[in-house]
Amino acid sequence: MTDQPATGASRPLPPRPGPHAPQARLAEILRVDHAGELGAVHIYRGQRAVLNRAPGKDRIAFQLQEMEAQEAVHLAAFDRLLTERRVRPTLMTPLWRVAGFALGAGTALLGEKAAHACTEAVESVIEEHYAGQIAELEALEPALTEDLSKFRDEELAHRDLALAEGAREAPAYPLLAAVIRAGCRAAIKISEKL
């Protein structure tokens, strides 16, 4: 296995040295992907907590429910993989639950477009992240690569829906999206290691 550059690009670096390096890298991948899916489920729960109660928001509430259900399937797959591979989840799990819910609720309180901007920003980072992992693992973990490819495609569908629904029309979109993307990238780095 190889390490990815910090930018998330798919150009692999030389493999880590040591006999247990591949297992350690796979543990990082599984841990961070589990954390990401956990965060996504809680983001959608936070958005739904606000928008399910808002009059005239049935359409977005249904969209959020469908996206949350897909993320829950991804999370269940990583729950299973963590158990099978004997990998512990990130120590940040309690914080990611709260932070995800707060991010979801906060952006939903800013309005429908801001909720979509959150989805677009998060899913753009996740797609880039999955693409790097797929390139890294395709020869060594074909079954996992297949799952990651399917999950990435579903994340892209979420991003594309958010864009179609006006994500970039959200108030202060460039700042909002930049802050969310930076937070996602930081959470990825932290979750890999802790």
Image (tube, rainbow, N blue to C red):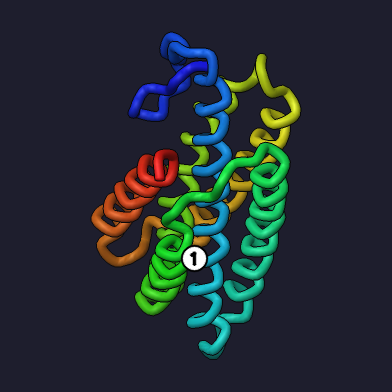
Q: Residue at x 60, y 75 (%)?
A: 61
| Quadrant occupied by the N terminus | top right
Mark 1 Cα-neighbour bin, 10 Å: few <14, some 14–19, many ≥20: many
Q: Secondary structure at mark 1?
A: helix
Q: Amino acid at mark 1?
A: Ile
The answer to whether 132 is drawn above or below residue 36 in the figure is: above
Q: Position of residue 31 (x, y in %)?
A: 53, 43
> From where the camera sits, is residue 142 visible?
yes
Q: Position of residue 155 (x, y in %)?
A: 59, 47
- Frontmost residue, 139 versus 24: 24
Provide the residue designation for mark 1: 43
Q: Residue at x 65, y 41 (%)?
A: 86
Q: Residue at x 43, y 23 (%)?
A: 4
Q: Position of residue 67 (x, y in %)?
A: 63, 61
| Quadrant occupied by the C terminus | top left
> From where the camera sits, is residue 113 visible?
no
